[in-house]
Amino acid sequence: MALISLVSAKSDGVTTAAAALALASRNPVLLAELDLAGGKLRHGLLRDVQRGDRHLDGTVGLHRLPQADWERARGEQNFTPQVAQHLWPLDDTEFRFALPGLTDPRQAASLSSTWPALLNVLQLTDQHLGWDVIVDGGRLVLDGGRLHPVLTPASVLHEADVVLLVVRMTEDSLVLAHPMVEALQDELQARGHGARSLGLLVIGPEDARTGVGIDDIVAEMQAPVLARLPWDERVARYLTQGGPIPRGLSRSVLMRSARDTAGPLREFAQRRRVHLQLRAAQAATPGVQQIVRQLGRLPQGALDG
């Protein structure tokens, strides 16, 4: 269905937004926690969720995939079953799952050789199984103006249908987000699916103290707002810390907004994918590319009748 990555310039609610979108999805969904500063799900939202009679422990998660990848490569096996062993249910629906993140940020370096195989599994889950794949990419780290090759899930962001930079309607969040938008647009244009795959996910109401509205953000950052979510302290606390399910969770303003947001995001991702496929087909076939250019030069109505 779609591969959607969420990131931020600071701690602006990426985990909350990603979890809300995953739990609100009406489609099968995989929430991949690829925040290389360390995961929050295992000690938060997933802490009371069981798989059979088992609670989540340190034997399951992203940090175990390098060893699984090494064993797979040695035996020339498919990596998908190994990844599947490290998925954990998000709830009791049996179609929402999570890949819990690192238990220690020092484990990030061990993933360097595993990213290609993991990315392939995420793409297969999306394109062949028809699942939504939502990536919690955490706080971005730059190295010389580029995404840090170890401390960010750069290869996944490059291949995402949509990359959402999560921002809050506060002055400090907006100030830090502005240079990150430019860095991400340059990165995605040079190594990903183009600058237009980047959009903003805005959390919270407009701040009357700053006088800045959504239109101002779009004009200033030169990036579209693709999604908006309200801030709901009670539900956000549950999504990040876990515990008893809040009463009326599915009817809360945050979860209703997440459901309303999921469809347009999926449609945007599909349009981006079709655009890229057409562009790739034209580039791969010079004859087709020439025909398309010729058709583009025809006067309007020349093909009618």
Image (cartoon, rainbow, N blue to C red):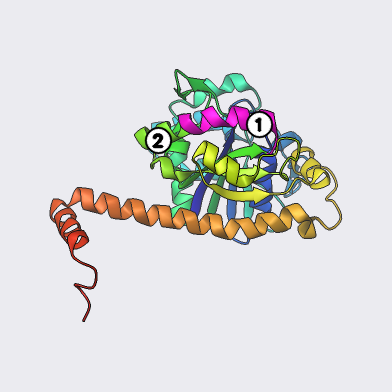
Identify the secondary structure beneath mark 1. Answer: helix
Estimate the x, y position of residue 271 in percent, counting from the top left: 42, 57
* Vertical placement of residue 176 versus 143, above or below: below
Q: Nearer the viewer, mark 1 or mark 2?
A: 1
Q: Residue at x 53, y 41 (%)?
A: 219
Q: Is residue 149 left or right of residue 254?
A: left
Is residue 174 found left or right of 145 in the rendered image? Answer: right
Q: Is residue 135 visible?
A: no
Question: Which residue is at 80% across, 55% downward?
Answer: 249
Pick the residue in front: 61 or 238.
238
Our reading of the magenta stretch's main secondary structure is helix
- Residue 127 in view of the camera: yes
- Label 2 sits on a secondary structure element that is helix
Query: In the rendered structure, which segment of residues is drawn in magenta?
Result: 169-183
Q: Nearer the viewer, residue 53 or 260?
A: 260
Residue corresponding to mark 2 = 75
Amino acid type at mark 2: Gly
Disc 1 designates what residue? 173
Q: Say whether residue 29 is magenta.
A: no
Give the class, few, some or many, for how many residues have Cα within 10 Å of label 2's Cα (few <14, many ≥20).
few
Residue at figure coordinates x 47%, y 37% from the top left: 157
Amino acid at dot 1 = Ser
In whole angstroms, how far apart are the C-alphas of marks 1 and 2?
47 Å
Above or below, 197 against 40 in this view is: below
Image location of residue 232, percent across then percent down: 79, 47
Q: Quadrant of residue 56?
A: top right
Q: Is residue 70 left or right of residue 299?
A: right
